[in-house]
């Protein structure tokens, strides 16, 4: 399994406490950049005022840091583009169209 796949597996363990789904399924992860033992995760929150933001960042750093060969994890928060759930995700969350 590639390092990126291992990182994705770890991101699937980071749950948004408000929605009860992992950040990967919620499409909050925009990019995973890997350079040697350094990983940069670019992600967003469901809203700029997310009360769980700091907790999610720490959870991402911890979980991704467990992947063999990862020494440093940086999390970059971006609100561009603003998070907008896909139609499939809206359906999963029970949101009307």
Image: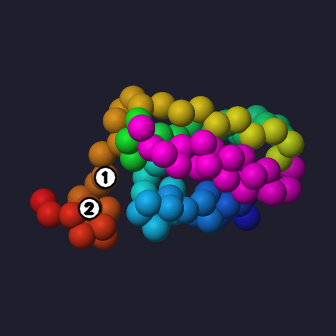
Judge left or right: residue 55 versus residue 90: right
Stretch in magenta: 49-69
Look at the numbered disc 1 and give the secondary structure of its residue: loop
Residue 83 vertical placement versus 10 (above, below): above
Residue in the image at 42% along x and 38% along y: 49
Residue 44, horizontal then vertical, whole percent: 47, 40
Front residue of 83/53: it is: 53
Q: Quadrant of the C terminus?
A: bottom left
- Expressed as whole percent of the image width and height from the top left, the position of residue 50 reads 45, 44
* Residue 75 at least partly seen: yes
Residue 90 is left or right of residue 64, and the answer is left
Task: In this rendered view, identify the residue nearer to me: 52 or 84.
Answer: 52
Q: Specify the label residue 65 is tagged with.
A: none
Instruction: Locate the N terminus and report the quarter of the image it occupies.
Output: bottom right
Q: Position of residue 39 (x, y in %)?
A: 72, 39
Residue 7 screen position, x and y as percent = 68, 55
Cα separation, mark 2 vs mark 1, equals 6 Å
Per the picture, the main secondary structure of the magenta-coloured stretch is helix
Q: Which mark is residue 85?
A: 1
Q: Specify the farthest residue to the front.
A: 51
- Compared with 17, 33 (above or below) is above
Identify the residue at image location x=59%, y=32%.
76
Q: What residue would you read off at disc 2?
A: 90
As helix, strand or loop, the secondary structure at mark 2 comes to helix
């Amino acid at each position: 399994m590639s390092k990126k796949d291992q990182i994705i597996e770890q991101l699937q363990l980071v749950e948004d406490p408000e929605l009860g789904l992992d950040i990967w399924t919620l499409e909050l992860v925009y990019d995973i950049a890997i350079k040697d033992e350094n990983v940069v995760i670019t992600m967003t929150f469901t809203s700029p005022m997310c009360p769980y933001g700091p907790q999610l960042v720490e959870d991402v750093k911890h979980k991704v840091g467990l992947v063999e060969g990862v020494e440093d994890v940086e999390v970059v928060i971006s609100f561009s583009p603003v998070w907008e759930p896909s139609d499939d995700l809206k359906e999963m969350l029970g949101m009307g169209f």
